[in-house]
Image (cartoon, grey):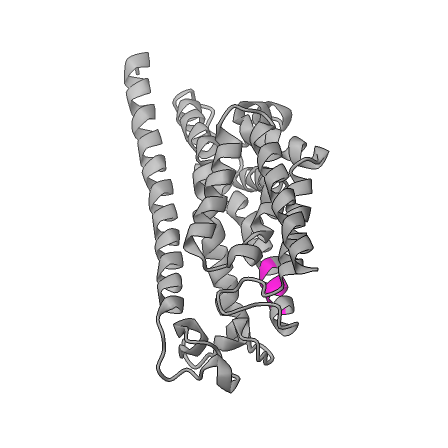
Amino acid sequence: MSDTALEAVLRRDRTVVAAALVLIAVLAWAYVLWLAADMAMPDAATPSAASGGTAGMDMSGMDMGGMDMGAAVAPGFRAWAPADFAFIFAMWAVMMVGMMTPSVAPMVLLYAGVGRKARAGGRPIASTAWFFTGYLLVWVAFSVAATGAQWLLASLTLLNPTMATNSTVLGGLVLIAAGLYQWTPMKGVCLRQCQAPIAFLASHGGFRSDPLGALRFGIDHGAYCLGCCWALMTLLFVGGVMNVLWIAGIAILILLEKTVPTGQLIPRISGALMAAIGVWLVVQAL
């Protein structure tokens, strides 16, 4: 196969992978938007906050197969049933897929392109799907922790119906902590691994030929991404777990941090702003 023909095939391969990534992200965001729309829809059968129930939001009163989602967010907390945990975990997992797929796309597309060249050269590497699955497994694991955090906040009656903290002091402290983390060496190390896919490959032994190796490779990359972004994800409890504009804002910040060649400038500017706003909130509440 000539170099020109090979490059044409590579471009098609990257187009297919890019289309798949876009589809995955679109489906995930569609699910998030659907949930947000349901939450915003008043339910006539839902008791008002004044009567001790969940304030008019569909998620709080929706049946969801017999599940009372009011327990997930309502001030009047009851013990979560297994279905409550499953639903909230699914919400977090899908939201993480929607938020993180755009920022990992450069690495996935690089993997797909090199994979085609490797196969053409008779030295195939494991499928891109193994790498991407490993990456997503890290965020699925994070979703378990996020579900536990939401349960804890709900049990302490620290969440309002939009799944944001109802404590100004707590919200301010989370902003301060997230802002300070943006300046830490750990943030810098993890962000550099995410910003430079080729450097990450070189420092981790290159691509893997076996599926389990590719899966572990994806997990390694996902772990650096988690180390880079976990503090930003805690901000969802400040602005609202189902606040679509807030979710999109955090996703855009993550994408800019990873893809715009400004080094540590974006995280440090955003971190300083977060910390300043957090201090202001705490001072105002005292």
Does residue 89 appear anywhere in the picture? yes
152 is higher (above) or lower (below) than 280 = below
**Residue placed at 34% from the left, 48% from the top?**
26
**Residue placed at 40% from the left, 68% from the top?**
39
Does residue 226 appear anywhere in the picture? no
104 is higher (above) or lower (below) than 196 = below
Q: Quadrant of residue 119?
A: top left
Question: How many marks on residues?
Answer: 0
Q: Is residue 206 left or right of residue 11?
A: right
The one of 205 and 239 positioned closer to us in this rendering: 239
Q: Residue furthest bottom?
A: 51
The one of 26 and 111 positioned closer to us in this rendering: 26
Q: Position of residue 22 (x, y in %)?
A: 35, 42
In magenta stretch: residue 148: yes
Q: Quadrant of residue 116?
A: top left
Q: Main secondary structure of the magenta part?
A: helix
The one of 172 and 143 positioned closer to us in this rendering: 172
What residue span does the magenta drawing correspond to? 146-151
